Amino acid sequence: QTLPANVQQRIATHPCYSESAHHHYARLHVAVAPACNIQCNYCNRKFDCANESRPGVVSELLTPAEAAHKVLVIAGKIPQLTVVGIAGPGDPLANPKHTFETFARIAEQAPDIKLCLSTNGLMLPEHIDTIKALNIDHVTLTINMVDPEIGAKIYPWIRWQRKRITGVEASRILHERQMQSLDLLREADILCKVNSVMIPGINDTHLPEVNRVIQAKGAFLHNIMPLISAPEHGTYFGLNGQRGPTPKELKALQDQCSGNMKMMRHCRQCRADAVGLLGEDRSQEFTKDRFLQMTPEYDP
Ligand code: SF4
Ligand code: SF4
């Protein structure tokens, strides 16, 4: 499937959304969001949110002021920087104050940089007006199921209205909020990509159904990512020894879904503090002790 011309134009400089842009444009993730409001069985909280980033890499937490400073420093040094995203280490919308203050500072000081947000969607409906007001043009939702029975094998609990909810009820609430998030993003004309983590034996045969539902609800790109079951990631809480898919299994599933909508196949499962072109990680040049010493040379 190819994308409509107006969507292609909107993503032309976004390295994650446009395959041709990823050779030319750079992105930066700032890690300002430590807390999460759900538990994914595949997540190890010591590391970054596995929804949008490679598990096993701990990023340095930044305050909104430090994050904005980092953006200005890097925008001065890497002129191809077009996108700044918040993707963790927890869920950005479980930390709304930090997340939105960071976006507001960047929007004010570097107005030409596009803002991008990744979330599990549980709290998105509450914040849709702020997302619109800040001109956040791209949102990634991680949706691993559209059937709460399957969800119960992936999510042991969610935190909802100050209570911890478990079992199928937790996944039913998460599912309803994710569907509502897709509707709200479509109505607001905000481009929505969906990430799904492929977990063999749990949701692998179910993801074509997820693909069909998200396409019908207006998501424009589907990124099916493999579960990473490297030893440093720890165990899959629900099932010790859970394996990730083989490259062949992943490709077969992507091929199966590709008749329906555009699939993302160049995702690098970046660090939550990734800097640079995809596949060219310059995060070590801009560790906190380094970038805080640098003076921004960015000129909007
Ligand atoms: Fe971990 Fe991200 Fe899932 Fe939260 S949403 S539990 S941070 S993988
Ligand atoms: Fe883009 Fe994937 Fe990296 Fe996110 S994790 S910045 S979608 S390549």
Image: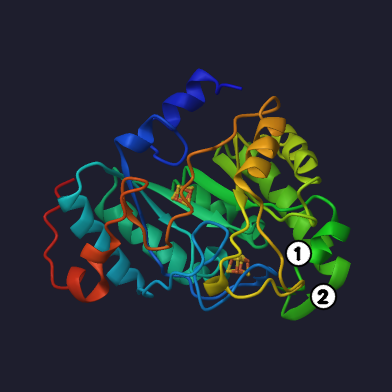
Give the label, 2 or 1, closer to the camera: 1
Of callouts 2 and 1, the N-terminal one: 1
**Label 2, label 1: how far apart the Cα atoms are:** 11 Å
The quadrant of the rendering that contains the N terminus is: top right
Q: From the viewer's perspective, is 122 left or right of 86?
A: right
| Residue 283 picture quarter | bottom left
Residue 277 locus on image (x, y percent): 31, 45
Image quarter where ligand 1 lies: bottom right
Amino acid identity at mark 2: Thr
The x and y percentages for residue 233 are 56, 71
Nearer to me, 28 or 113? 28
**Local crowd at mark 2 within 10 Å, few (<14), some, or many (≥20)?**
some
Residue reaching furthest to the top: 5
**Which of the pair 130/182 is nearer the observer?**
182
Around disc 1, counting alpha carbons within 10 Å, would you say few (fewer than 14), some (14 to 19), or many (20 or more)? Answer: many
Residue 222 position (above or below residue 168): above
Q: Secondary structure at mark 1?
A: helix
- In the rendered image, which residue does mark 1 sit on? 154
Residue sitting nearer the eye, 3 or 150:
150
Vertical placement of 273 versus 200: above or below? Answer: below
Task: Confirm whether residue 69 shows in the render.
Answer: no
Residue 144 horizontal/vertical position (percent): 71, 53
Does residue 221 lie above or below 81 as drawn?
A: above
Residue 9 makes an appearance in the image = yes
Q: Residue at x 49, y 59 (%)?
A: 53
Residue visible at 61% across and 52% down in the picture: 226
The circle on residue 166 is 2
